[in-house]
Amino acid sequence: MIIEPRMRGFICLTAHPVGCEQNVINQINYVKSKGKIDGPKRVLVIGASTGFGLASRITSAFGSDAATIGIFFEKPSAPGKLATPGWYNTAAFEKQAQEAGLYAKSINGDAFSNEVKEKTLALIKEDLGQIDLVVYSLASPVRTDPTTGITHRSVLKPIGAPFKNKTVDFHSGKVTEISIDPCTEEDIQNTIKVMGGEDWEMWIDGLKAANLLAPNALTIAYSYIGPELTEPVYRKGTIGRAKDHLESTAFTIADKLSDIGGNAYVSVNKALVTQASSAIPVIPLYISLLYKVMKAEGIHEGCIEQIQRLYSERLYTGGNVPVDEKGRIRIDDWEMRADVQAKVAALWEEATTENLPSIGDLEGYSNDFYNLFGFKVGGVDYTADTNEVVEIPGLQ
Ligand code: NAD
Ligand code: NA
């Protein structure tokens, strides 16, 4: 079929398999161009099909020759039915991994469930024996607690007072004022349940109890801080509370891993266009201004550049892992540079519907958004008849 982008609100309902494949190949080529990393050999990535998790899987495999197991929640393809991008990404990744002689298997299901955890542990036991690195990169709006059976929904709201600021609809380019009402106490607890560290700890507990973590094993989860501008709705809002919880869970897990010489880290990553971040109000306006400034400075990065740098310059240098005063790895260092932030803050003041296309990188934002779904990718013939059914070779 001929596959075209079909937008509804902030999501795209279609995905292009060849465009997704090309994105993955581009990421693989980037990692290869940076040379070998003396990193992990057996890696479990939870949230492996898109964004930072996919970049972690690619960096592990093609930077460090690692065998990888990927966990994700994606819609498969069927005749006449398109898959979600993460499905096509994974199919492309596994094809490339197999051609390179690298072990790669995947499990598609709810990572929060006991069932997927058990299936994963059995697969590791059978195929890899133990794991050297566990990457935890889930972004989800809901989680059913396997112990209580209760389904929790996360919210993106300020705490204590309404938040009023500018935002942009990146499809229309319209800059408007939004006002978001503050959350309830229950919203905070639900958001922590979904995006905090509880599930990460459950994964590590399960792996450790089954003796599936190798000596000196590491685990890493991803966090975000961002500028003062977005604080009320991000870092000091409901999602920020969940990130506080995630970050404190790293210490709990690190303690539990100390007897095997292991460690747990949170890496604070840069703001990037992903399916998760485009749903957060205000963030798209911030990102479009940030991209403009960082590109002008020659310090712009995407997920793959971020994670390649995380591995090669933070986690696997052979020396100590550098962390901030709260024990976090900072790979958002270039985003948070004082000169970059001062420029973004000044542009924010000025931003209007009329001037945003020139003072901000609205086009870059929009392009990255299309790219997430395999559209507007260089070298892809979108007029060609494309097979929508694509298999993931190592799917369990
Ligand atoms: P993403 O939406 O691209 O990826 C989410 C992944 O989680 C996908 O692989 C998806 O299949 C998987 N997933 C979701 N629900 C699942 C479930 N129930 N079971 C199994 N898999 C499931 O998101 P992302 O932006 O790469 O976010 C990953 C992490 O990075 C998050 O913790 C996020 O907060 C953090 N982060 C994001 C940004 C950003 O700007 N995008 C910046 C810093 C940190
Ligand atoms: Na991810």
Image (cartoon, helix red, strand yellow):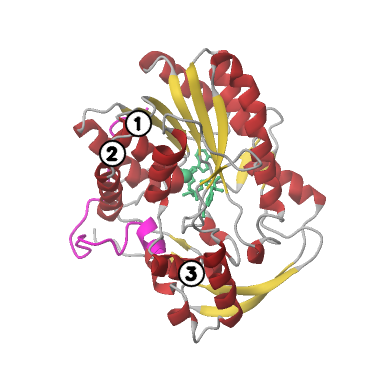
Name the quadrant containing residue 165: bottom right
Q: Name the residue under label 2.
A: 391
Assign a secondary structure to mark 1: loop
Query: Of the residues shown, which amino acid type is indicated by label 3?
Result: Ser
Q: Distance between the residues labelled 2 and 3?
A: 35 Å
Front residue of this view, candidates 29 and 365 = 29
Q: Nearer the viewer, mark 1 or mark 3?
A: 3
Residue 348: image x %, image y %?
Answer: 58, 75
Residue 378: image x %, image y %?
Answer: 24, 62
Q: Is residue 354 left or right of residue 55?
A: right
User: Is the residue 131 above or below the residue 230 in the image?
Assistant: above
Seen as rendered, the residue at the extreme bottom is 354
Residue 12: image x %, image y %?
Answer: 43, 61
Q: Mark 1 points at which residue?
A: 395
* Quadrant housing the N terminus: bottom left
Q: Distance between the residues labelled 1 and 3?
A: 36 Å
If you read the primary sequence from the N terminus, does the residue marked by circle 2 or circle 3 appear first?
Answer: 3
In magenta, the rendered stretch is: 368-396
If you read the primary sequence from the N terminus, does the residue marked by circle 1 or circle 3 appear first?
Answer: 3
Q: Mark 3 points at which residue?
A: 288
Residue 48 visible, this angle: no
Residue 16 visible, this angle: yes
Magenta region, mostly helix, strand or loop? loop
Front residue of this view, candidates 81 and 356 = 356
User: Is the residue 177 above or below the residue 61 in the image?
Assistant: below
Q: Is residue 22 left or right of residue 38?
A: left
